[in-house]
Image (cartoon, rainbow, N blue to C red):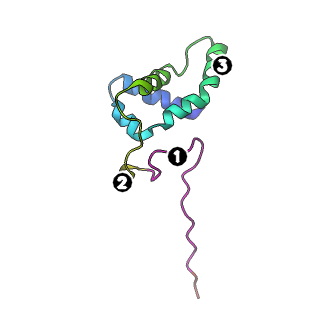
Amino acid sequence: MKILDYYEYMCEIYESGILSRKTIVTLRGQLMIRTYDACEGYIMETRNRQGRLVYEAFERFVDDLRGGAVSVEPPPPAASVTGDGGWARLGEADVQEEVPEPQVE
């Protein structure tokens, strides 16, 4: 699952000291926790099947968010890059409003 790989990569970069916890929370917010919860069964099944820990950094980061001091609330709308306040639904594309084509006479 690409999103799990992406989150694992972000969390590994966080653990290496390159990204701050606050930066990740601002970019992804509550969505990381919801994604982990939705995929936890898949993660555990994959660990059992492969006989190794996968998505370990992602799991540690989510555990830290659940008990941590940095708020996991979305950023204010003005700070949102996607315009959704960081609350895009899992697997949902960013859809823009359709604008009608100008009529040529």
Image vertical order of residue 17 relative to residue 73, above or below: above
Describe the element under mark 3 as helix, strand or loop.
helix
Q: Which mark identifies residue 88?
A: 1
Q: Which residue is mark 3?
A: 45
Q: In this orientation, does residue 96 appear? A: yes
The mark that comes first in sequence, 2 or 3, is 3
CA neighbours of label 2 inside 10 A, class few (<14), some (14 to 19), many (20+):
few
Task: Tell me which residue sits at (57%, 29%) in the image.
Answer: 37
Q: Which mark identifies residue 78?
A: 2
Residue 98, position as x, y percentages in the image: 57, 66
Residue range highlighted in magenta = 82-102
CA neighbours of label 3 inside 10 A, class few (<14), some (14 to 19), many (20+):
few
- Mark 2 or 3: in front is 2
Query: Marks 1 and 3: in contact by CB < 8 Å?
Result: no
Three-letter amino acid code of the residue under disc 2: Ala
Residue 27, quarter of the rendered image:
top left
Three-letter amino acid code of the residue under disc 1: Ala
Q: Is residue 84 magenta?
A: yes
Three-letter amino acid code of the residue under disc 3: Glu
Task: Tell me which residue sits at (37%, 35%) in the image.
Answer: 71
Task: Tell me which residue sits at (57%, 34%) in the image.
Answer: 2
- Secondary structure mostly seen in magenta is loop
Image vertical order of residue 38 relative to residue 43, above or below: below
Q: Quadrant of the C terminus?
A: bottom right
- Mark 3 or 1: in front is 1
C-alpha distance separating marks 1 and 2: 16 Å
**Relative horizontal placement of residue 98, taking residue 49 as reference (left or right):** left
Task: Tell me which residue sits at (65%, 13%) in the image.
Answer: 48
Describe the element under mark 2 as helix, strand or loop.
helix
Q: Is residue 61 magenta?
A: no
Image vertical order of residue 10 relative to residue 52, above or below: below
